[in-house]
Image (cartoon, coloured by chain):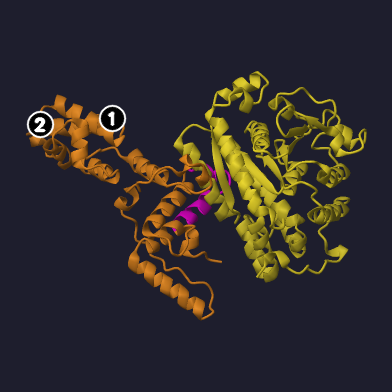
Amino acid sequence: MKQSHYEVLELKTDATPQEVREAYLRIKHAFSKDSLATYSLISREEGEALLQRIEEAYAVLSHTERRRAYDREWHETRALGGAEAQGQSFTDSVAVEDLLIAPPTEDPFAAPQQVATPRREAVGMEVEILSSIAKETEWRGTFLQAVRKSRNISIEELSEFAKVSKTYLRAIEDEDFKKLPAIVFVRGFLVQICKKLKLPEDQVVPAYLARVQKAKQSG
Amino acid sequence: MDIFNVPPVPSVPEADLPQSGGAAGSAQTEEHALYAEYLQMPRGRIKQIWAIGGGKGGVGKSLIASSLSIALGRQGYKVVTIDLDLGGANLHTALGIDLPRQTLSDFFESRVATLRDVVTPTGLPNLEMISGAQDSVQVTNLGFREKAKFLRALHELDADYVIFDLGAGTHQNTIDFFLYADLGILSVLPEPTSIENAYRFIKSVFYRKLWLSPRLQRARELVQTAMDSKNAKGIRTPADLYRELGQMDAEVAMLMKSELDRFRMKLIVNQTRTQTDIDIGFSIKSVCKKYFGIDLDYVGYLEYDSAVWQAVRRKKPLMMEFPNAALVSNVERIAKYLAQASMGDAARPR
């Protein structure tokens, strides 16, 4: 019996786009390869098949048009008394940006009456970011920018926190090395950026500075 | 349709029942009869029976059982908490009292007349306890007759809530005590070993529940087959079983689904240190839903707290020794939530 996309993501059919995304991140996290929660219970193959179903469901439900078409088809099959709707197999991968936007909500666990309700799934999100961060080795300006945006931090906010002008921050994100001051200063900027973006400065700083140095030498 | 009023399924001739070797055959029918009888038994004063299990040792079952009991007592309910970690009983220590003179052993061996005679006061408001058996009776050698005697005597207890503190492991008796409770609470640590054992525990409970269910009589043989993880039918997961059942008998498959919907298990993640630890509860919930088709209710987490071992060393209940610990408010919140939830459930048949 094939589960509907809604069932796969444990959603009601009237779920908002925000809820769809939160559920996707939460469930994807639960079934991810390194998840403690599937330990000893679900084999690698089962896990991969499930992950694929999750991606498939999200590809449809996160897309307004596709979701509408899917809902329509589902209702039609229902009306005809047929079997359950067959989910279309949209295999489009999900853009990184989709994974990285954390919903700003407070922690429901703080309030007693909400003890049993699922909290915001920001932690699933965190893991998504962490997993892409874990794989990162280059630490290019574009990546730093993507992380900053994913965490909903404006360049102004970062500038205020790091006490670094927006011009320099933009130059760092654009990797416009000519606009940057001496390396010793850039190092300080990067350390501040890492603090704000919660990135491992021991990795980011050397990787980034290596490129600055190379550019300065050749330029 | 009211799933609780499904007409009884025709009984299967004795010869068709699964015979898993020799004497086990008759024991199975005994077990089924007891289960069916238990479902009809008068409840006396008891609103609900809660069982705390978790498969692995050291995951905080006694801590949770004792703390929930104390919290319920404080909320004004009369509570009897029973140490069913037979052979390894130490709930009395978690409650800060000496080993009671009378234990379940005396009840099982008929040295006392009723279960009420082994109830010991704890000195805490509204809270009494029954100590686990010592020496002579272990959970592994507790016979069917003792188990039946115990279950039949439960309704005599003068309590709103009865709490079972279960032992480690997945011995059939432990699984049964978990199943016979109205509410099964599972305690898990955010560690692979604990999670592995918790799943083993859930799996055992899951199959045992299906196997015992009077409404799933026709599926018993298939459930029995599925319990053997290397079965020839290729049933590896509960989902496989469900599919197989559906092909065999659509009505039974539907009944299985309704059994699972009524099967309410609560999850507590203990010793959380980070947000990631707390979130493991949500992940386990998702995994159980997908894998077993069971809705696990994640009722809360208990923060890691060094006050616990200090309290244990002092042989005092944490709730009394460190009333201001974060953990204590975690427990009180969970107790309150579960008590409220059980009020809503009270009207529902089990």
Q: How far from the left and from the top, in percent, is residue B115?
A: 85, 38
Magenta residue check for A41: yes
By secondary structure, the bulk of the magenta-drawn segment is best described as helix
- The disc, 2 or 1, on the residue closer to the chain's N-terminal end is 1
Residue found at x 72% / y 29%: B91
Q: Residue drawn 84% across and 25% down?
A: B101
Rendered image quadrant of residue B322:
top right
Q: Colour of chain A?
A: orange
Q: Which residue is mark 1?
A: A201
A60 displayed left or right of B151? left
Subunit ID for the residue under disc 1:
A
Residue farthest toward the top in the current orientation of the protein: B314
Residue of label 2? A216
Residue B95 image point, x, y percent:
70, 27
Q: Residue at x 46, y 73 (%)?
A: A74
Report the span colored magenta.
A35-52
Tell me the SS state at disc 1.
helix
> Considering depth in this image, is B52 or B45 the residue closer to the camera?
B45
Q: CA distance from mark 2 to mark 1?
A: 21 Å
**Residue B165 position (above or below residue A188):** below
Q: Residue furthest front?
A: B76
Place residue B150 in its image quadrant: top right
Image location (x, y in percent) of residue B34:
84, 52
Depth check: give the residue in front, B25 or B8.
Answer: B8
Residue placed most toward the observer, B152 or A214: B152
At horizontal 55% and vertical 41% (from top left) the residue drawn is B300
Residue B293 is inside the magenta segment = no
